[in-house]
Structure formats: C-alpha cells, structure tokens
C-alpha cells in the first residue's frame, strides 16, 4: 500500500512497472485464451443463470483452478485436458480476496491447454456494479427494468467466474438468452438470433455475438432491455466504415442524435490521429437510467448516464452539449488507449484515464473550435489537478495498488486531471506532431497487449530524441508539483535582455513545507511571454535544478511586462516579487488584452492559492479581481475563475461576521452587478457560444451576490414559468432560477416552490439535465422543515433520488444558497446519525468516501477538524464497532479522510490568518 501522505525520496526508474510484490493476484499456473460464455438473465426474479467454458494454457503443474468470483453461487466445475475430464472435488471461496478455488484429484499438466467449465447463478443487484438492474417508468407509468453491466475495475467476477485482471486478456464468445421482445447487446455484432419457447412457457431468443478481439475482462459488457436506437455510419479515411448507434429506452432514442453525430466524427478523428483503424465493426453507445459513473468505455458497447448522452438538441443547454461532446470523446479515446492497448496493472490507471482526458478534449476542440476548449480546460481539469495535488495526502500519478479494495480510491483528480495536465504539458513542450508520432508507434507495438508507463516514455523518447523517462520522473513517480519563486531579475540594457533567477520547491496548500518534503527536483518546461513576444512568440526554457536563471529578450519601454507559464501550459505555480505583482495589476487596468485569458485566470488562481499557503496576502487576489472588474473584464472563462475564487473565499468565511461576508459579496457585485442589464435574460437561437455562457454566468453570480433586481427578475420569471409560461425561463438559466426561488422565499411561499420543483422533477417529460438541476437546488430551501424532509425522507426515496444522484443532493446542501453556519454542522451530524444506513447503501466501502467528504469537507474550525478526526478514529467505540469503523476509514476510504482533514485545517488556517486583512480591505474599498 502506497503511503501517499509521505513524500517519497526513493530514486526509482521512471516508468518502470512498480513492484508486484504483495499484490493480490491469481496464481500464474493458468492463463486464459478464450471464454465461451452463456448467460440467461431474468428481469422478474433479478437472477441469472450462466455457464462459462474457459480455454486456458497451463504453465505449471497444478491440481487447482483459482478464479475470481464474487457473490456467485457455483453449482458445478470441471476441467478437461485431452481425454481426461475431472469434476471438482471441492469448491472453496475466499470472500476477502474474491476468489473461488476448484480442487481436482489429478494434476493438470503444464505444457498444453485445458478447458475449465463452470455452472453458476448470480443476482442482478441494485448497487450499480456487476451485472445489475436499473429501473424506470415507461410511457404508461409502469415500472420496468433493464439489466446492464459495469465491470471496471474488478466486477466482471460478479457476472461470471474469470481471470479478472487487466493483463489476463482473452477472446470472448458471448451468448444471451432473453425475452423475445427485448434488445440484447454485447461488445460485438449479433451473428444469430434463435427464437424458442423455454420450459416455463416464455417466448425467448438466444442471441449469439461474434468473437471479440483479445481483451481484458473489465471491458466486457451486456445489456438487456426495451431499447430503440438511431444510427449512422462513420467513414474514417482509409479504413472500413463503422456502424455507430445510440440506444435509449423506447421513446427516447431521438434524444441521441447530437451524441450520434459527435460519436461518428470522433471515431473518424481518432482513426486519423492514432493512425490505427477502429478494430470493431460497430460502436454502440447506450443511455442507462441508473449508472454510477459518467460513462464506461466497454469495447464496442459504451455505457452512459442518460444525462451524459441524451439531450433535446433544440433546448439543451450549452453546457449540456459540451459535457456530452467531451464525455463521448473521452470514452471513444479509450477504444484505442485502454482497450486496444491496456495497462498491465492498476498502478498505471493514469495511462488510461489521463491520456483519454487529454485527447478527449483534443477531439472536442477539433470538432468545436469555436468553444475555445483549452482556456476552459484551465479553470476545470488543470485547476482540479493543482488543487488536489497541493495536499500532503495526495498521491503520485503512478501509485502502487495491492488489492481490489485499493483501486476505487485512485479514480480521482490525480489519475484523470493531473495525468491529463502532465500529458498536455509534454505535448506542448515536444510539439503536437512529435508527441503524436510517439503515441502512434506505441500503439502499433502494443495493440492487443498490455503496457507500463515506461513503454510510452520509450516511444516518446524515440520520436523526440530526449530522455523522456528521466524528464518525467518527478511528475509521475512523486507526489505534488513545483512552485517557481522569482528570486531576482536583472536587466541588461546593452543586450536588451532580462535574466530572471528562479528557485523551485514543492507547493503545499497548507504552506508549512518541511525540508524532508522538498527533496524532489522537477524538470520544468517554462514559457515566457512579454510585451515583445506577444501571445504567439513565447520563448521556451527548461529548469532542471533547484535554482537556475533564464534569459530572454526584453526592453525597459513604458508598459513593458513579462510573465511565466504562458497559457498555463506547465503544471506549476509562480510566485512573483511584490513589485512585479503591483505592475501586473496596474497593467491589467490599462491594457487588459496584454495578457491572454489563460494568463489572467492564473494570476487570480495563483494569488488566491499562495495566500492559502501563507506565501502572500489574500489582498493580492482581491486587488487582482478588483483591477479586472474596473478594466471591464468580460471574457467568460476569466469571469468564471473570478466567481470560483470568490465562492471559495465566501465558503471559508461562513463562520465570520456578517460585515466581512457581505464585503466579499460587494466585490462580486462590482464584477457582475451591472453586467446583467447589458446582456438581459433572453437567449437568441443564433447567438455566439460564449455570449450564451457569459449571460448564464453573470446572472448566476449576480443573484448569488445579492443583487436584488436580478433576484427579483428571476423570481418573477420563475412564477410565470410555474404557471405555464415555458418561455419565461430559458433552459440555460432554469437551474439558477430554481435555486434563487428557494433561497429567497419566505415562510409563506417556500413550500409551494419546493412542491412545484418536485413536480417538475417527477415529470417524465423533464430532461435529465434539468432534473439534476432541481436535485442540486433543493438544498437551498429557506426552511428548516423542508431541509429536514429532504435529508431524512426524500434523499432515501429511490423513486425521487436515484442512487447515482445521491451525492448531487448532498453537494447541493453543503454548497447551497442557505445558512451555511447551520446547514454544514447539520449535515455532518446527519452523516454520523445515518452512517449505518449509508453503509447498507454503499456495499463498496471505498464509495463511502463520497458522502463522508461531502458532509465534512466544507467545515471550518479547529473544533470541526478535531471532531471529524475523532469520529474517523472511532473514539468512544469498542469491540466490533471500533474494528468496523477502522476497517472503513483506514482501509475503505482513508484517502478521503486524510484529504478532508487536510482541507479543513488548511482553510481554517487561511481564515485565522487573513480574516482581519479581509475586513480591513473591505472597509477601505467599499
């Protein structure tokens, strides 16, 4: 187990496979070649029957067959080698290791193949993993079910006994027996469908699918339900056409047209980018009502939450379309990077997720260049990476994983966002063509195989002529990222150059960096933009030591400037000298366009996080925001960063006096207050992408900041909307209006608003994206009685809140427009009171980290951190209760516990250190 809260100083070879010692993996005696799998799901009893015949190669003499199996009942097991067929004399389960061992009288001899045959039954659970069931109401209001699989990371073993490890690839021949009127889908195309009447007198059909390519078990998928589809054909250059289909529940398929077009164009793009044809004859994308993740890249049968795939293109919000486009691109990137070439073990999960995140945005940018994806990337993916990796309790991109219990905790912002940001940084430094060339040769060598990080570095080294393994050591094998501090600058008037002396150290949000935590020296690519270079001629440099100097062209003309990390291409923060910060602030007020939108974003982001770490005053961030406001900042992504920063500050100040909290709102009103009148509330159909996004943002920010005219306009439009005037609230601002209506209602109206929103949420004609907006809004209800009803009744009513949406409601409560000083302690108490109920909901204990984090992370105060830590430790418990608590918080979701405690303490220190400065700044500025 990796101790991620300790900074490693061990010098390992970058990219090498981390040690397999201590991993819970299957014995090496047998390796799978092919699975012949037969399954018969029952959508009434929610059980399934199955048989599997696994062709294996025998590498060691053995009289045992050990397979992964979880929550399956095994009825029979045999092994056949040559003419000898044996029935298992014993069947032994290891629940902790999720294995089943079949023992036989005679040895299965090494050097040839054998057939392992197993008969079994299983359960279609409602836990959103394995071969599970999902419910919905049809057009007549009848409750119906479908069954679907979600196997990543280690849940194929819940559907059939298997060698359930990513490196143990095989081919699959799959057969499903289903009711005659239902659709049956799997990874490959259907090759036959035979109708018959079963022994129970039901009309059924046996559907056989073509053999898959060699692949990992976690990518196998089956779906059975009442689906219909829309389809098209992707035509990648120089490759076979691909049938692309979007499946949805009957009556909903037309909502898949937007995703269908995106999917076909993305497959064409990736076929060219990777220079490798998509290897399957079809690509199905399926919308599922109950789905824990956003989507899953099963090869040829990609599954999605409804909201991530379906939309009414005419009325869908701009954000909804952007989310669908990216999610589709991300999952289809996996068809090559993850499916065709797969990590050998879960410690290299980032090879799948970090890369798919980067090229997912790359494809989205290709399809929709008008969206200016990479500036938005800075406020989203990049910021997520910087935030989580600034904690001591973060972990390296490559992290040792010993067992299935550890895997769930690394599906986080490090594997996805930091992994993506590191890839983006490398792509920018090497150049897109050189980077792509390395990726292409990597895919060619390892298609249908497994790899480790070192393999990718080797190919990028070959394409670039650089030692990529050495350069990337600190970025993938160590925790954290650097802070570059400007120590000195020296201008040479004769040569017209500026020499800047820098130092690098690990950045910690807590700020109390210890010498033993600062042993890593990162290879840092530095881009410098100045008044001489403009935005297209940034100079490039490299810093590979703790201290160094860079020199670039410069002159001392009026309004001269320079800035590091142009466009936030590198994963690091920068601390400028105070005089330089003041100069930048002055320049922003007189020449806003001197800096790119990405650079303006990072001025704010860095200033705020440096103050969090105690490395600069919070007033630097506030001054920067005020300067941008006075300069008339109007770029959407910069405004979004301002809102995010002020929201974070307000969230941390919820226990402070009203005057200080109101002062932060005054700054928000300065930025956003006058903009609503300029943009209005109407959304012309043909208007530009960013105009639409900006309108929504400024309305939301102004309402949140207490601009009464905006709050009143939104409420008036909400009332008209509820009374039947659908045009009163455009879909882009409905969620904003819902929150505003609940937060600004008084005791006489709040219940009617709450009831009206629940009615909209339960209406089958309401789009899933709008239903989600309502679930997020409910926590802003200005009523203790309604909050009590929400957290103790509605939240546990699966007819209203699907399990996949549970966290949405919790986050809506702790981040809602409500009385945080009351709600946040209430939610922490609610979590403790309902812990056993939550344990029964989340069978996978690592998933409990979600509600724990939601209910505890927004707390502030030394008393709060002490209370949370005491609870996690199990203080006051004894015996079995104490052991269960420790098992949950130490083994199940220890990362969530560590990160939550660190977050509370870091933000508490910020407030204690800066609250008087904030109050003084407010008093002198407003």
Image (cartoon, rainbow, N blue to C red):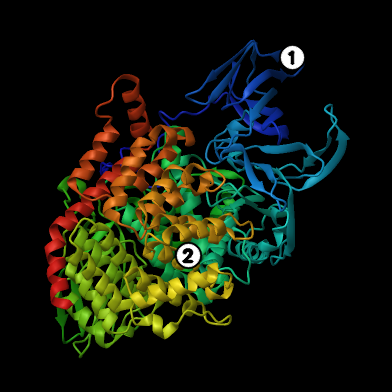
Report which residue position mark 2 lands on. Answer: 735
Instruction: Indicate the quadrant where residue 555 lies.
Output: bottom left
Q: Position of residue 396 (x, y in %)?
A: 35, 47
**Disc 2 or 1, which lies upstream in sequence?**
1
Q: Nearer the viewer, residue 170 or 767?
A: 767
Q: Position of residue 654 (x, y in %)?
A: 24, 57
Q: Point out which mark residue 84 bears.
A: 1
Q: Position of residue 459 (x, y in %)?
A: 49, 55
Nearer to us of marks 2 and 1 is 2
Q: Position of residue 699 (x, y in %)?
A: 41, 74
For label 1, the SS is strand
Tell me if residue 907 comes above or below residue 31 in the rendering.
below
Instruction: Indicate the quadrant where residue 82 lies.
Output: top right
Tell me the crowding category of disc 1: few under 14, some 14 to 19, or many 20 or more residues within 10 angstroms, Cα based.
few
Q: Residue furthest bottom?
A: 558
Q: CA distance from mark 2 to mark 1?
A: 67 Å
Name the side, left or right, on which 904 lies relative to 404.
Answer: left
Image point (59%, 50%), residue name: 297
Q: Is residue 698 visible?
A: no
Q: Nearer the viewer, residue 452 or 820?
A: 820
């Amino acid at each position: 187990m990796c101790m991620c809260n300790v900074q490693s100083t061990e010098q390992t070879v970058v990219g090498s496979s981390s040690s397999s010692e201590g991993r819970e993996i299957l014995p090496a005696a047998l390796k799978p070649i092919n699975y012949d799998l037969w399954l018969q799901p029952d959508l009434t009893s929610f059980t399934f029957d199955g048989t599997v015949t696994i062709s294996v190669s025998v590498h060691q003499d053995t009289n045992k067959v050990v397979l992964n199996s979880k929550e399956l009942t095994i009825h029979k097991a045999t092994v056949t080698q040559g003419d000898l067929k044996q029935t298992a004399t014993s069947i032994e389960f290891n629940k902790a290791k999720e294995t089943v061992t079949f023992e036989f009288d005679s040895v299965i001899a090494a050097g040839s193949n054998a057939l392992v045959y197993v008969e079994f039954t299983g359960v279609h659970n409602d836990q959103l993993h394995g071969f599970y069931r999902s419910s919905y109401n049809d057009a007549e209001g009848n409750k119906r079910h479908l069954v679907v699989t979600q196997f990543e990371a280690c849940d194929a073993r819940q559907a059939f006994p298997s060698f359930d490890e990513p490196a143990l690839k095989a081919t699959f021949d799959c057969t499903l027996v289903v009711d005659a009127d239902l659709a049956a889908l799997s990874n490959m195309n259907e090759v036959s469908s035979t109708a018959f009447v079963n022994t129970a007198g039901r009309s059924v059909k046996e559907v056989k699918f073509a053999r898959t390519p060699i692949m990992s078990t976690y990518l196998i998928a089956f779906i059975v339900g009442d689906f219909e589809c829309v389809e098209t054909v992707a035509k990648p250059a120089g490759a076979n056409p691909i049938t692309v289909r979007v499946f949805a529940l009957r009556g909903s398929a037309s909502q898949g047209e937007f995703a269908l077009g995106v999917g076909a164009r993305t497959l064409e793009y990736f076929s060219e980018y990777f220079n490798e044809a998509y290897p399957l004859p079809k690509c199905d994308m399926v919308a599922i009502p109950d789905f824990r993740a956003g989507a899953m890249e099963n090869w040829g049968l990609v599954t999605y939450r409804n909201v991530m795939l379906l939309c009414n293109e005419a009325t869908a919000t701009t954000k909804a379309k952007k989310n669908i486009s990216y999610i589709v691109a991300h999952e289809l990137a996996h068809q090559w990077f993850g499916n065709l070439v797969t990590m050998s073990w879960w410690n290299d999960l980032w090879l799948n997720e970090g890369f798919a995140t980067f090229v997912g945005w790359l494809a989205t940018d290709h399809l929709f260049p008008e969206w200016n994806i990479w500036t938005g990337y800075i406020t989203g993916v990049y910021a997520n990476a910087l935030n989580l990796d600034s904690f001591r309790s973060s972990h390296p991109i490559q992290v040792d994983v010993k067992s299935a219990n550890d895997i769930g905790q690394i599906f986080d912002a490090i594997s996805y966002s930091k992994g993506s940001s590191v890839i983006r940084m490398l792509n920018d430094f090497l150049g897109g063509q050189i980077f792509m060339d390395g990726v292409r040769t990597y895919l060619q060598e390892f298609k249908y195989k497994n790899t480790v990080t070192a393999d990718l570095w080797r190919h990028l080294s070959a394409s670039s002529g650089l030692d990529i393994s050495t350069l990337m050591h600190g970025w993938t094998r160590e925790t954290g990222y650097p802070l570059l501090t400007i120590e000195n600058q020296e201008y040479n008037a004769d040569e017209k150059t500026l020499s800047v002396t820098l130092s690098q150290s690990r950045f910690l949000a807590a700020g109390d960096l210890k010498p033993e935590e600062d042993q890593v020296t990162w290879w840092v690519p530095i881009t410098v933009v100045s008044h001489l270079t403009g935005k297209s001629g940034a100079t490039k440099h490299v810093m590979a030591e703790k201290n160094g100097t860079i020199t670039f062209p410069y002159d001392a003309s009026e309004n001269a400037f320079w800035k590091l990390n142009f466009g936030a291409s590198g994963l690091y923060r920068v601390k400028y000298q105070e005089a330089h910060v003041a100069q930048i602030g002055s320049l922003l007020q007189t020449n806003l366009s001197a800096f790119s939108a990405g650079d303006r974003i990072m001025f704010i982001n860095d200033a705020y996080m440096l103050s969090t770490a105690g490395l600069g005053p919070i007033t630097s961030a506030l001054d920067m925001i005020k300067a941008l406001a006075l300069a008339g900042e109007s770029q959407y992504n910069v405004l979004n960063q301002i809102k995010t920063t002020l929201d974070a500050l307000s969230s941390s100040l919820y226990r402070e006096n009203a005057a200080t909290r109101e002062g932060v709102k005054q700054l928000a009103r300065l930025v956003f207050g006058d903009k609503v009148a300029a943009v209005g509330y109407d959304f012309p159909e043909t208007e530009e992408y960013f105009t639409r996004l900006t309108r929504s943002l400024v309305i939301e920010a102004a309402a949140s900041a207490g601009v009464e005219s905006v709050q009143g306009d939104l409420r008036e439009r909400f009332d008209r909307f509820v009374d039947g005037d659908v045009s009163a609230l455009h879909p882009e601002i409905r969620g904003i209006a819902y929150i505003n209506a609940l937060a600004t209602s008084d005791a006489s109206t709040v219940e009617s608003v709450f009831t009206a929103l629940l009615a909209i949420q339960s209406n089958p004609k309401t789009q899933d994206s709008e239903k989600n907006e309502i679930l997020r809004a409910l926590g802003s209800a200005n009523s203790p009685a309604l909050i009590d009803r929400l957290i103790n009744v509605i939240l546990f009513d699966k007819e209203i809140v699907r399990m996949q949406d549970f966290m949405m409601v919790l986050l809506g409560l702790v981040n809602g427009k409500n009385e945080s000083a009351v709600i946040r302690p209430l939610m922490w108490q609610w979590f403790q009171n309902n812990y056993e109920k939550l344990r029964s909901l989340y069978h996978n204990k690592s998933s409990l980290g979600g509600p724990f984090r939601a209910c505890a992370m927004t707390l502030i105060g030394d008393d709060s951190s002490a209370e949370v830590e005491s609870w996690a430790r199990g203080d006051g418990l004894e015996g079995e209760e104490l052991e269960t608590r420790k098992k949950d918080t130490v083994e199940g979701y220890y990362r969530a516990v560590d990160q939550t405690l660190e977050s509370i303490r870091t933000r508490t220190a910020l407030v204690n250190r800066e609250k008087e400065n904030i109050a003084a700044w407010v008093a002198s500025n407003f």
